[in-house]
Amino acid sequence: MVKIVLEREQSNAREMDSSEVGIILCDLGGKIVYIGNKAEEWFALGEMTGRNLTDLTQSLERYIQPAAYTLTESIQDFLRGEMSFKQIEFSYARTEERLFSLYLTPVMNSRKMKNHGILLEFRACSAEEQMNRMRIERLGIVTHEIRAPLMTMMGYVEMLMQHDLSEKNRMRFLEIISAEGNRLSNLLDDLLDIEQMESLQLTYHKTYVSLVELVQKMAEQWNLKSSHYVYAHFEVEDAFVYADQSRLIQVLYNLLSNAKKYSPGQNRVDIHVGEDGPFFFVEVKDYGMGIPEELHERLFTKYYRVEQAGQIQGRGLGLYISKQIVEDHEGSLSVTSVPEQGSVFRLCLPKPSHLE
């Protein structure tokens, strides 16, 4: 009887499968019996028919935003019969970010007396729906992130106004207020960059920039104030690229900041400048906690942060913005990393044509 019901539903699923809807059908035990063409196209699932639905959802979760969202848990709740219908909305970012709605419905027999499985219907949201979702998401991020530094600043200002403090405590409070102000300013800069990127309004002012001179100056400035000492290594005498210098500084500063944040207990960062065929490269190497290989692709997606680094401050925007800037310069940004051994972020930019 179960087989007949599922075969009937599979026939219905083929009819439903279209340019607008991606269909996946599984039995009550979670075994996948059918994947529609559109679902396969959208998610590039590979050969999943016959496997457990958990394998599929865990594959999807690698690219779902926000990172903490657990599609697997929601579907397991449904399979246990804890709900009769469920709609889920999520943002999926494998090649490009897209918003999807997922509808979960039970597969019933003809009398609707018994559940024999689960039908997953994925629908891609329109561009307008995606824009509205991103605006709401951004508003939530802004509200959450701005509140913390503002409350800290207001608290310390109030203590400065109400108490007669020693010069030492007064300076310490002012330093905290200044640091929180910088944090707030950086957040607003990041959000403005994202807004311009997504509206295709981010502009660049390109000139010929020496990577050797730029890295030397950044290392010297960094070493004046950081607990992590930057050791700069140059495999080339000159490495000129056609780029927006302020944006390159933004990218490199973000890579150095991450190297410091994610290598607590260490005091060294190495940065290498060299050439690789038609490209010049800059590599930033730390000796910190490292990142599992299966998470490498997600590092460059919006709002993603490595789970084991939850205690480290950050918004998950820096690498997303940096990668977009580098790709707008026809370059690439990649990572190699081993847990407990550190990470190497590699920035590659094309040599100007007259140097090839």
Image (cartoon, grey):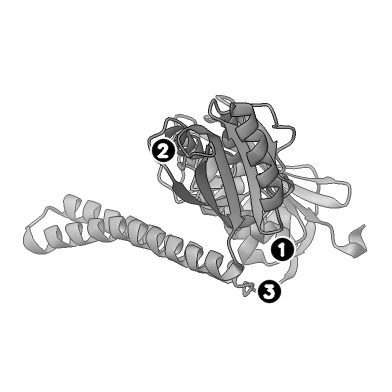
How far apart, in angstroms, are the residues tagged by discs 2 and 1? Answer: 30 Å
N-terminal label among 2 and 3: 3
Q: Quadrant of residue 29?
A: top right
Residue that badge 3 annotates: 205
How far apart, in angstroms, are the residues tagged by discs 1 and 3? Answer: 12 Å
Residue 348 drawn at (x, y percent): 75, 50
Residue at 61%, 50% (x, y): give it: 93
Residue 119 drawn at (x, y percent): 57, 41
Residue at 69%, 56% (x, y): give it: 213
Q: Amino acid at mark 2?
A: Gly
Residue that badge 1 annotates: 328
The circle drawn on residue 300 is none
Q: Amino acid at mark 3?
A: His
Q: Quadrant of residue 171?
A: bottom left
* Label 1 SS: helix
Closest to the observer, 39 or 330: 39
In this rendering, would 146 be left or right of 159? right
Give the position of the N terminus as an image quadrant.
top right
Give the position of the C terminus as an image quadrant.
bottom right
Q: Amino acid at mark 1?
A: Asp
Label 3, residues with CA under 10 Å away: few <14, some 14-19, many ≥20: few
Residue that badge 2 annotates: 310
